[in-house]
Image (tube, rainbow, N blue to C red):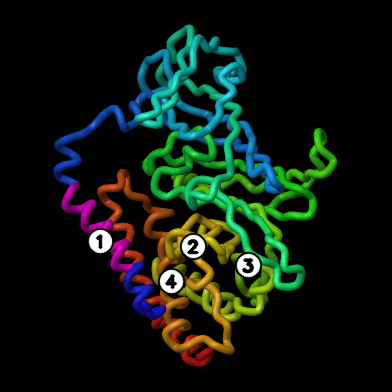
Amino acid sequence: MLSLRMEFRGYVEMRFAVALFLVLGAAFARSQEVPEYRLPTTFKPISYRLDVTTHLENKFTFEGVVDIKITCLKATNTVVLHSNNLNIDTKGVAVSDGGGKVVPVTGVGFVTKTELMHVKCAEKFKPGNEYVLTVPFMGNITDDLVGYYRSSYVDKETNQTRWLAVTQFEPADARRAFPCFDEPALKATFKIRLGRRKHLTSVSNMRLLKSTPMPSNPDYVIDEFEESVPMSTYLVAYMVSDFAYVESKNPEEEVKFRIVARKDAIGQTELAKNAGPLVLKYYEDYFDEKFPLSKQDMVAIPDFSAGAMENWGLVTYRETALLIDPNVATIDNIHRVAEVIAHELAHQWFGNLVTMKWWTDLWLNEGFATYVAARGVDYVSLIVIGYS
């Protein structure tokens, strides 16, 4: 059986191997472009308004609508974007110009092989003009560990299974959760609203603004979040669960910092709660660049395919990569958690703020984050040693 230290090294080596593979294949990829798998350069997204309602009890489905403000770059009569394994209400797909005038939609088509959706209109779009594309959609909350998927745990007090829904979009699975321009270079702002049952809570990349009753269903609430900074679709994140959280209490911190986990594990968050804010502040000083968000959540997920994922403002982790049980943890466990936290927070600058244009440059993203993470761990080493 692999030790936790070896597990972490395996995680890093796996990501490095993927990055190396992409580097070696970059020249070939650039010389052998496959246009059918890439979006045409006819539109650029500006902003998304994304509404998603989550149904966890027995149904495991979600439904929503996305309004995408786009700028036309080249004359065309067709908008091409990504959609994968979603049920699209094609009759509800609509396009309007900047003044609210409807642009008639004549057809909506899908190419399963390339995961592309084509919205054809009766008139050509004009370069330089802005339009709004509206797409209603539905989907299943699967157990695939990608897209918008479900996870579970057993409540120790009641011995009942508790369900949650959480996203994992890197590299190309945002399109499984909502129709979008799912390429890393196509950054846009996101205004997200999440519908969920009253007894649950939701989190997303940005700070919660308000919660209001859902007019169409008295058992549901709508959580509205701040508009995001411009970001790639693979960094969009949200979760609906019954999790609890602990918050860093340092009044001098400008960024609200929370650790989110199942209630049974909330006592295992002390290391993350102390080390996370210090690493974030260290990076701000080291890069001479402020963290651009008002909050940073780090969430421990029971079922998670990777070690962690650097979603802006909502970093998700495998439980063993974030939580530490002080009664049984070894120094290797503690150091590993510190390393993963430092790595993912480094990505808030390397990857999130500065993003590769295409996945062939992922090695830069991972390489810089791995190097800087070593400095971050060194900075908080006294906390790690003290906790040990």
Membership of 341 in magenta stretch: no
Mark sitting earlier along the chain (1/4) = 1
Q: Which residues are magenta?
A: 12-25
Q: Amino acid at mark 4?
A: Val
Membership of 21 in magenta stretch: yes
Distance between mark 2 and mark 1 Cα atoms: 31 Å
Residue 203's x, y, as percent? 64, 54
Neighbourhood count class around disc 2 (C-alpha, 10 Å): few under 14, some 14–19, many 20 upward: some
Mark sitting earlier along the chain (4/2) = 2
Q: Nearer the viewer, mark 3 or mark 4?
A: 3
Neighbourhood count class around disc 4 (C-alpha, 10 Å): few under 14, some 14–19, many 20 upward: many
Residue at mark 3: 261
Residue 8's x, y, as percent? 38, 73
User: Could you say which is closer to the camera, residue 66 or residue 86?
Assistant: 86
The mark found on residue 290 in the picture is 2
User: Could you say which is closer to the camera, residue 369 or residue 290?
Assistant: 369
Distance between mark 4 and mark 2 Cα atoms: 21 Å
Q: Amino acid at mark 2?
A: Lys
Q: Nearer the viewer, mark 4 or mark 2?
A: 4
- 261 to 91, vertically: above or below: below
Q: Quadrant of the N terminus?
A: bottom left
Residue at mark 4: 340
For image coordinates 55% across by 46% down, the residue present is: 142
- Per the image, label 3 sits on a secondary structure element best described as strand
Q: Is residue 207 visible?
A: no
What predominant SS class does the magenta segment belong to?
A: helix
Neighbourhood count class around disc 1 (C-alpha, 10 Å): few under 14, some 14–19, many 20 upward: few
User: Could you say which is closer to the camera, residue 26 or residue 125?
Assistant: 26
Mark sitting earlier along the chain (3/2) = 3
The mark found on residue 17 in the picture is 1
For image coordinates 79% across by 39% down, the residue present is: 214
